[in-house]
Image (spheres, grey):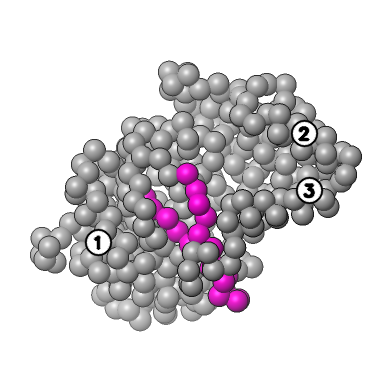
Amino acid sequence: MTQRHAATVSVIIAAYNAERYIAQAIDSVLAQSYPGVECIVVDDGSSDRTADIVKGYGSRVRYLYQQNAERSAARNNGMSQAGGEFISFLDADDLLAPEKLAEQVAFLGEHPEYDVAYSRVSYFNDEDGSSFTPQRRSPSGDIVLELLYGNFITIHSPLIRRQAAARTAGFDPARNRYEDWDFLLRLALAGAKFGFQDRLHAKVRLHPGNTIGDQVKMFEAKLRVAERIVAVYGAELARRSVDAQGLVAFHRADYGRVLVLAGRGAEGRALIREAARFPFRHRKIFVAFAVAAGIFGSGMLVAAQQFYDRVVKGKRAGKGGSA
């Protein structure tokens, strides 16, 4: 495929005070083996050298500035200005693999039944260079029923047909935690079909500034997204035979679990008890967890959770290869 005939991909990078990492993120976009790439950086009101660094790339990067409105608004701004047939997102501190866009464009060309291609990502520690690749479930097709119970698609992973993205209202500007899951859920509920490629296409940097580091706020946000989805899409969920009360109960119990692990045991156990009034997925496990928390306290459960993450989920340094 020559550059003249290549379908354009718009990669949107939302950046806020990103001077430390933004050049690496941009370089990973410009290094794509796919020729037709438009790189858009939306500066969300940075007060550091982000603007100077981005403008230093000249015409190779489109620079957009907005008053600080958080990353959901920044991504929407980028989408409104994008000219690509396909849309991809990248955070300013993360990286794309060089072959990501070429392989995903080819995949969607071979599979017109899919609106979104997604793949695996690895996580790497910014301090010691260790990395891991989560072994998440990876369904294809109509993934709504799987996606309702948690986000297994990191936002850097998907390549989205522009026409599919247009069927949603974009990211919710009121959400800046779990906004990715909210967006992908609404995309799937709007009828988008997802296709999984078993390829490693992006690298997520772990450092103290990550929002994913604040588990309590993240899981509270997850619960709020679930509540909103049930409120707005109740009829569609009923059509799919989804128990809306049970869905919210699952996410309430999961938030309670994280509160227990964060040392807020009484509050967390109360949420799990409240959730347990309804039948939901893994209800008995959550109830047993709450009982154990009441008997043994949070410390032992934190250790058990860390063991589970390390051994069962495979979150071991180096499992996904070097960063």
Magenta span: 118-137
- Which residue reaches farthest right? 295
The amino acid pointed to by label 3 is: Leu
In the picture of the structure, the residue carrying the numbered disc 2 is 288
The Cα–Cα distance between marks 3 and 2, rounded to whole angstroms, is 11 Å
The mark that comes first in sequence, 1 or 2, is 1
The image's mark for residue 102 is 1
Q: Quadrant of the N terminus?
A: bottom left
Number of marks in the rendered image: 3
In-image side of 226 versus 108 (left or right): right
The Cα–Cα distance between marks 3 and 1, rounded to whole angstroms, is 44 Å
Q: Residue at x 49, y 64 (%)?
A: 320
Local packing at callout 3 (Cα closer than 10 Å; few below 14, some 14-19, many 20+) is some
Q: Which percent across, then down, holds residue 79?
A: 34, 53
Asked if marks 1 and 2 touch (Cβ < 8 Å), the reply is no
Mark 1 element type = helix
Whether residue 200 appears in magenta in the rendering, the answer is no
The image's mark for residue 19 is none
Q: Residue at x 24, y 55 (%)?
A: 105
The amino acid pointed to by label 2 is: Ala
In the picture of the structure, the residue carrying the numbered disc 3 is 301
For residue 41, which quarter of the picture?
Answer: bottom left
Local packing at callout 1 (Cα closer than 10 Å; few below 14, some 14-19, many 20+) is some
Whether residue 120 appears in magenta in the rendering, the answer is yes
The Cα–Cα distance between marks 1 and 2, rounded to whole angstroms, is 47 Å
In-image side of 164 versus 178 (left or right): left
Rendered view: 60 above or below 273: below
Q: Residue at x 21, y 59 (%)?
A: 8
Mark 2 element type = helix
Q: Which percent across, then down, holds residue 314?
A: 58, 56
Nearer to us in this view, 216 or 272: 272
